[in-house]
Amino acid sequence: MIRRILTSCLVVGLAFVMVGCASSKKKMAAIDDQAIVNVIKSECESESGPPGPFAFDVDSVDGTVTLYGSVPSEDVKQQILQIVRDVEGVQKVQSFLEIKSGA
């Protein structure tokens, strides 16, 4: 009887530990994704970044970066894509950037 109770407590305890670890990984992924977005925005808006004007949004989920918006030329689009690819933690890039003169 005591052995069953102890076994049950152990199983329940392990379940809580596993749920806690999974929760921590999700929080870390969210922090990493936000860091990726921040680096991309910072690099693109820096003086050494691509010439504007451009208007685009950046999303990152589990290292997959998605870009939405408009840029003034194919050259600027490629520069932005290269910046994104060079950011640590980026696993995949999805681009929905449109080329619009005077973006």
Image (cartoon, rainbow, N blue to C red):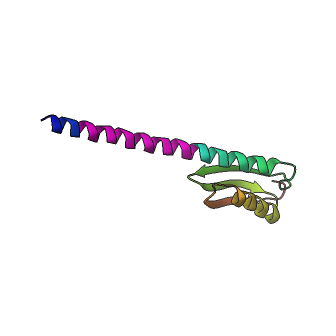
x and y percent of residue 20 in the render? Answer: 42, 39
* Residue at 71 percent of width and 53 percent of height: 69
Total numbered labels:
0
Say if 72 sits above or below 23 in the image.
Answer: below
Residue at 73 percent of width and 61 percent of height: 81
> Which residue sits at x=84%, y=55%?
102
Q: Percent x, y for residue 58?
A: 67, 50
Q: Is residue 97 visible?
A: no
Q: Quadrant of residue 100?
A: bottom right
Q: Position of residue 85 (x, y in %)?
A: 69, 60
Magenta segment includes 19: yes
Residue beneath the point at 50% across and 44% down: 26
Quadrant of res 78:
bottom right
Q: Horizontally, is 15 left or right of 38 in the view?
A: left
Any part of residue 84 in sight: yes
What segment carries the magenta color? 8-30
